[in-house]
């Protein structure tokens, strides 16, 4: 490709040097136009959602392939861009990259573009070039620290309004529409009974973990054209997969309690009444690899959540009693689908101690017992 580009450039330079003004005017006006980029994110970096502002901060990577005619997965393709980094120039209000590439001038020359964000680095993202029988791919590995989980986005190359396949010099700016190929998880919890006005009893979430058997992957490979994840039967998250404290690079919003001498690192779900309390910091989520692409889990209980909580009763200004409980609940079928955001709301049922008087037995017949005093 490089040799061809240099040869074309040399021909143009010689033509400009030896031709009349009229001959220059008759050249193809679309030849040697620079290739520009623009982006758009579909309706959905550190456990936070990767929208357009985040893409502008991180930049995105482009894989592009030149073909003689229409692109084919199992056809010849020449690499035109290999993980080209594109960044946002705020002063110019435009996307920029270097060195700038130009549209080829051949009548049958086509270029197909694929993009992903955030740009590859120490974030578990590794782009893989296409070859004669495969589309370009993105290898993805979940971050060890849940706080640093990455919301991977990839372009939709066949989108009706932002198609990036088989482009030529008349196509103008290449517009990428980014989609979310992972699954996003939020969690919240509440009590089944409003005890917000009860100054003597509180409920605290102390631990949350995901339980599964060969369902939740830790690594995956995404086809950038088909937008599907390859089956992976070897790399799984540990089970139970414990959600760790946000203060320790995790996602669970645990803080030291301060209630009648109870100081366990936990989340108070009592104060909001029957309104659910988020278990994660604001605008932070788990980003996980989907289960079976757009299908999700096959059956209820394929993935379970184990929740530990303390019910604390105040007995004095600095004293208390507590009941520690662990519950394991089945998540429904069809969760963890590709491109979906789900919020799991857990309700902790409380069994209040109540009193009732059913009867007061009578005294019966009074007996007369004589007592002699000497």
Image (tube, grey):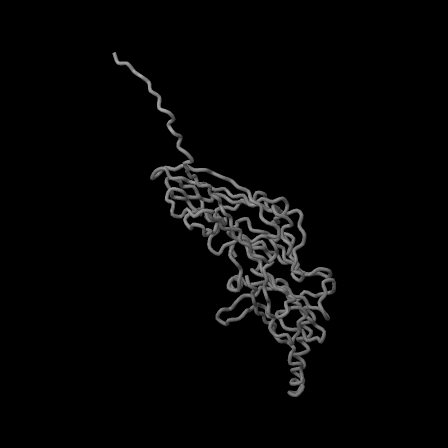
Vertical side of 247 occupied by 225: above or below: below
- Please tell me how many numbered marks the rendered image carries: 0
Q: Is residue 273 visible?
A: yes
x, y (%) of residue 235? 63, 47
Q: Is residue 81 visible?
A: no
Q: Is residue 16 left or right of residue 276?
A: right
Vertical side of 60 occupied by 201: above or below: above
Point 71% across, 76% down: residue: 107
Vertical side of 52 occupied by 327: above or below: above
x, y (%) of residue 236? 62, 47
Point 43% across, 37% down: residue: 322
User: On the rendered image, what quadrant is the C terminus found in?
Assistant: top left
Q: Is residue 264 left or right of residue 175?
A: left
Instruction: Give the camera-side residue of 57 and 121.
Output: 57
Point 65% across, 50% down: residue: 298
Among all residues in the image, which is located at the extreme top? 374
Residue 179 quadrant: bottom right
x, y (%) of residue 119? 57, 60
Residue 75 quadrant: bottom right
Point 47% across, 42% down: residue: 309
Instruction: Give the camera-side residue of 314 and 69.
Output: 314
Q: Is residue 302 left or right of residue 352?
A: right
Vertical side of 83 occupied by 195: above or below: above
Instruction: Give the camera-side residue of 321 and 31.
Output: 321
User: On the rendered image, what quadrant is the N terminus found in?
Assistant: bottom right
x, y (%) of residue 337? 61, 55
Instruction: Give the camera-side residue of 75 and 325.
Output: 325
Among all residues in the image, which is located at the extreme right? 75
Among all residues in the image, which is located at the extreme left? 374
């Amino acid at each position: 490709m490089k040799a061809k580009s240099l040869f074309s450039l040399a021909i143009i330079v010689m033509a400009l040097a030896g031709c009349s003004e009229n001959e220059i005017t008759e050249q193809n006006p679309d030849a040697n136009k620079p290739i520009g980029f623009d982006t758009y994110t579909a309706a959905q970096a550190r456990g936070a959602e990767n929208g357009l502002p985040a893409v502008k901060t991180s930049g995105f990577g482009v894989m592009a392939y030149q073909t003689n005619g229409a692109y084919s997965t199992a056809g010849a393709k020449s690499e035109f861009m290999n993980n080209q980094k594109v960044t946002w120039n705020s002063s110019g209000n435009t996307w920029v990259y270097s060195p700038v590439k130009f549209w080829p001038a051949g009548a049958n020359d086509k270029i197909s573009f694929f993009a992903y964000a955030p740009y590859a680095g120490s974030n578990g993202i590794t782009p893989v070039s296409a070859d004669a029988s495969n589309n370009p791919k993105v290898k993805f590995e979940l971050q060890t620290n849940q706080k640093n989980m990455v919301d991977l986005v990839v372009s939709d190359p066949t989108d009706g309004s932002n198609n990036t396949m088989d482009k030529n010099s008349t196509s103008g700016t290449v517009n990428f529409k980014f989609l979310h190929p992972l699954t996003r998880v939020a969690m919240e919890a509440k009590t089944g009974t409003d005890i917000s006005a009860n100054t003597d009893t509180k409920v605290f979430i102390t631990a949350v973990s995901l339980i599964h058997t060969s369902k939740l992957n830790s690594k995956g490979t995404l086809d950038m054209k088909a937008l599907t994840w390859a089956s992976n039967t070897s790399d799984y998250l540990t089970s139970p997969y414990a959600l760790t404290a946000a203060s320790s690079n995790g996602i669970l919003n645990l803080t030291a309690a301060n209630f009648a001498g109870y100081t366990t690192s936990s989340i108070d779900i009592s104060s909001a009444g029957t309104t659910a309390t988020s278990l994660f910091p604001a605008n932070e989520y788990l980003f996980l690899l989907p289960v079976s692409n757009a299908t999700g889990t096959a059956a209820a209980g394929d993935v379970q959540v184990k929740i530990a909580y303390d019910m604390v009763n105040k007995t004095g200004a600095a004293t208390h009693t507590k009941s520690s409980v662990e519950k394991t609940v089945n998540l429904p079928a069809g969760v963890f689908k590709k491109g979906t955001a789900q919020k799991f709301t857990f309700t902790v049922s409380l069994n209040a101690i109540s009193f009732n008087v059913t009867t007061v037995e009578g005294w019966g017949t009074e007996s007369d017992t004589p007592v002699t005093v000497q």
